[in-house]
């Protein structure tokens, strides 16, 4: 009896990787899970406080803003009966997620040099996993805000059912800006010093310690070019309710800017992706 030989053929087709790129994102989903779980463990490994950093950072920021803006500058919450501390913390939730995403994503490729230079997979998985990992900090901070509401005996608005939609918008903002900065950081290492400055500067020009209602009406559209304005206004509308109106204007502008950054980020990332292994 003769054994039938089985031939294994490897076909190399020009442009095949390009055509199947988005399909490969799904095929390599297990790698996405592995990288996400690894980032979660590594982030707090060999730290004394551990995961409590997710509580300490927003809590201290909230205290600083409350003391400076509420106690010293005598600014009100502009949100009905909502305490000033909760107004600030409702804004810190999306902002901390955005800031952590930028910091983690911008350095993600540099941190995975060995993996990028040896194995093929869609490089988009790495910064995306970093952004997803930042969601863990978000949910920890959200739990802290629930405790803060219990302390102040504050009942959130029924609008809170729409919170996942604004969290999705925050994710899109983080992905767009994060992918753009990630690609640039590989080629221009100066961006590792620029990103912390962007995060710090953005905190003060975003309506975190104050309400965007304090911005003069004629400058509202210009101010809303910061995509986090619509996200923060949306979070406050969902959580605080009260006298807050639905942020239609800032939301529309933020949506346009967020999708523009997302397109720009994916375009810049895909344009430079082939040269990542050489640049790193």
Image (spheres, rainbow, N blue to C red):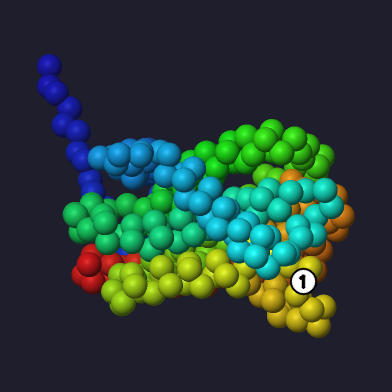
Quarter holding the N terminus?
A: top left
10 Å crowding of disc 1: few (<14), some (14-19), many (20+):
few
Residue 89 in sight in this render: yes
Total marks placed = 1
Q: 189 above or below 98? A: below
User: Of 6 and 142, which appears nearest the observer?
Assistant: 142
Residue 168 in sight in this render: no
In the image, residue 239 lies at what x, y percent? Answer: 74, 46
Q: Is residue 65 left or right of residue 224?
A: left
Mark 1, residue position: 214
In this view, the residue farthest toward the front is 72
Label 1 secondary element: helix
| Residue drawn 14% across the image and 23% down it | 3
Quarter holding the C terminus?
A: bottom left
| Residue drawn 58% across the image and 38% down it | 144
Q: Is residue 147 left or right of residue 3?
A: right
| Residue drawn 21% across the image and 40% down it | 8
Task: Determine the image quadrant of residue 142.
Answer: top right
In this view, the residue farthest toward the top is 1
In the image, residue 279 lies at what x, y percent? Answer: 23, 71
Q: Is residue 21 left or right of residue 208?
A: left
In the image, residue 15 lies at what x, y percent? Answer: 36, 64
User: Of 78 and 105, which appears nearest the observer?
Assistant: 78
User: Of 98 and 2, which appears nearest the observer?
Assistant: 98
Q: Is residue 96 left or right of residue 82?
A: left
In the image, residue 29 lies at what x, y percent? Answer: 41, 41
| Residue drawn 55% across the image and 66% down it | 203
Task: Determine the image quadrant of residue 179.
Answer: bottom left
């Amino acid at each position: 009896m003769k054994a039938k030989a089985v031939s294994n053929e490897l076909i190399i087709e020009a442009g095949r990787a390009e055509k199947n790129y988005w399909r490969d994102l799904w095929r390599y989903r297990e790698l996405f899970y592995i990288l996400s779980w690894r980032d979660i463990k590594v982030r707090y490994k060999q730290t004394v406080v551990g995961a409590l950093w997710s509580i300490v950072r927003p809590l201290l920021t909230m205290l600083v803003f409350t003391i400076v803006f509420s106690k010293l500058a005598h600014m009100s919450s502009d949100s009905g009966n909502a305490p000033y501390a909760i107004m600030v913390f409702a804004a810190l939730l999306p902002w901390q997620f955005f800031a952590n995403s930028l910091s983690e994503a911008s350095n993600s490729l540099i941190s995975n040099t060995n993996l990028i230079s040896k194995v093929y997979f869609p490089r988009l998985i790495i910064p995306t996993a970093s952004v997803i990992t930042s969601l863990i900090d978000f949910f920890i901070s959200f739990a802290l805000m629930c405790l803060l509401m219990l302390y102040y005996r504050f009942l959130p608005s029924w609008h809170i059912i729409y919170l996942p939609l604004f969290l999705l918008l925050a994710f899109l903002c983080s992905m767009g800006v994060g992918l753009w900065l990630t690609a640039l950081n590989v080629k221009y290492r100066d961006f590792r010093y620029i990103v912390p400055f962007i995060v710090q500067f953005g905190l003060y020009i975003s309506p975190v310690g104050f309400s965007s209602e304090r911005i003069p009406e004629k400058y509202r559209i210009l101010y809303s070019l910061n995509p986090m304005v619509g996200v923060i206004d949306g979070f406050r509308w969902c959580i605080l309710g009260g006298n807050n109106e639905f942020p239609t204007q800032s939301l529309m502008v933020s949506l346009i800017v967020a999708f523009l950054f997302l397109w720009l980020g994916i375009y810049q990332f895909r344009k430079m992706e082939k040269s990542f292994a050489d640049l790193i």
